[in-house]
Image (spheres, helix red, strand yellow):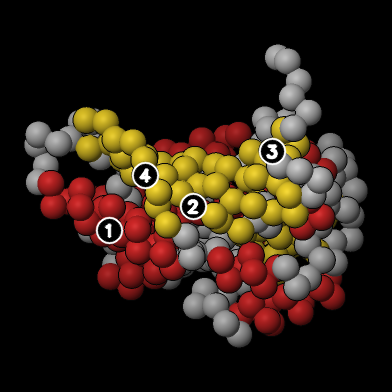
Amino acid sequence: MEKDDRILVGFNHADDAAVVRLDNDRLLVQTVDFFTPVVDDPYLFGQISAANSLSDIYAMGATPLFALNIVGFPIQTLPHEILTQILQGGADKAREAGISIAGGHSVDDPEPKYGLVVTGEVKEQDMITNAGASPGQVLVLTKPLGTGIIATAIKRGVAPVESMNAAIESMRTLNRIAAETARHFRVTTGTDVTGFGLLGHLKELCDASRVSSEIDFSKLPFLPGVVDLIAQNIVPGGTKRNLAHVQPVTEFDSSLTPHELLMTTDAQTSGGLLLVMEPEQAEQYVVQYNSVSPVKAGIIGRIRERSDSVIFVRS
């Protein structure tokens, strides 16, 4: 493929968005994401999908500028009011992010799908990629895990109300506060936690940074009800595939159960940011973020020298 010197971030290291240089230090950041409904309420689906799409921009340290809708909808079989509610949810979430949806594209599709193309901007010195972590630094996660398991329970009609409400609130929460708080600290590396699960995205970060990492399972935050649901074998197919993908390069503590292994790779929708900082910076970040955010962050592990195992998960 012919090299384009304007493209600073592309396919190279599985980063969250593409980055193109506009001029000396101004960079354009762009991403696209869409998926099928994870909840029954069309308005909430629109909000969740929009928050998920915006997450990639925040993960790169950028500020969103505007968005475009991308829609698939069975226009002949479902009421038009459902589509209106989906689009309203997306528009309201975009407005919360401080941007407008300036257009988009739709197709007639047997299964509803919705998402956004989001364009943002960042100065080069403020850009965050998934390459740059160093041994001795620590990992901060800004949202609890388990949305994939709970979304599967919702689809099967067995999700407890508390679990469902907590998952929806987490998924519809923008990573805006997490990203804006991070600008006051020295974040060396970052990504968001979505479909590949915590360990899948951590593997990408470690590979890009040429380091290994260690996670403390006891410090991982999970949404309420996740432990009980996974005990009932309510596990998304994507979560199982994620575990199969990372298992060859991950050393799990022998005391962890098969269910706990799956909990570390649960496929997330609109998950939190995974940020790498020096320990003191991370502690200050967590305090400041938790004082203003409805969802809470915590330090979940550390960066190590590169070794044969990319990830170590301790009990």
Query: On the rendered structure, is 223 left or right of 80?
Result: right
Return the x and y of residue 31 as percentages of the image width and height: 55, 42
Q: As drawn, which residue projects farthest toward the front?
A: 23
Quarter where residue 208 is shown: top right
Mark 1 or mark 2, which has the lower sequence index? 2
Q: Please, what is the three-letter code of the amino acid marked with disc 1?
A: Gln
Q: Are marks 4 and 2 in contact (CB under 8 Å)?
A: no
Return the x and y of residue 108 as percentages of the image width and height: 22, 30
Residue under circle 4? 103
Q: Secondary structure at mark 4?
A: strand
Q: Residue at x 49, y 78 (%)?
A: 294
Labelled disc at residue 66: 2
- Give how far apart the Cα atoms at labels 4 and 2 are: 10 Å
Quadrant position of the N terminus in the picture: top right
Q: Nearer the viewer, mark 1 or mark 2?
A: 2
Q: Please, what is the three-letter code of the amino acid marked with disc 2?
A: Phe
Q: Is residue 77 above or below residue 130?
A: above
Q: Please, what is the three-letter code of the amino acid marked with disc 3?
A: Val
In-front residue for pair 53/122: 122
- Give how far apart the Cα atoms at labels 3 and 2 are: 16 Å
Q: Is residue 36 above or below residue 190?
A: above
Q: Nearer the viewer, mark 4 or mark 1?
A: 4
Quarter where residue 13 is shown: top right
- Give how far apart the Cα atoms at labels 1 and 2 are: 16 Å
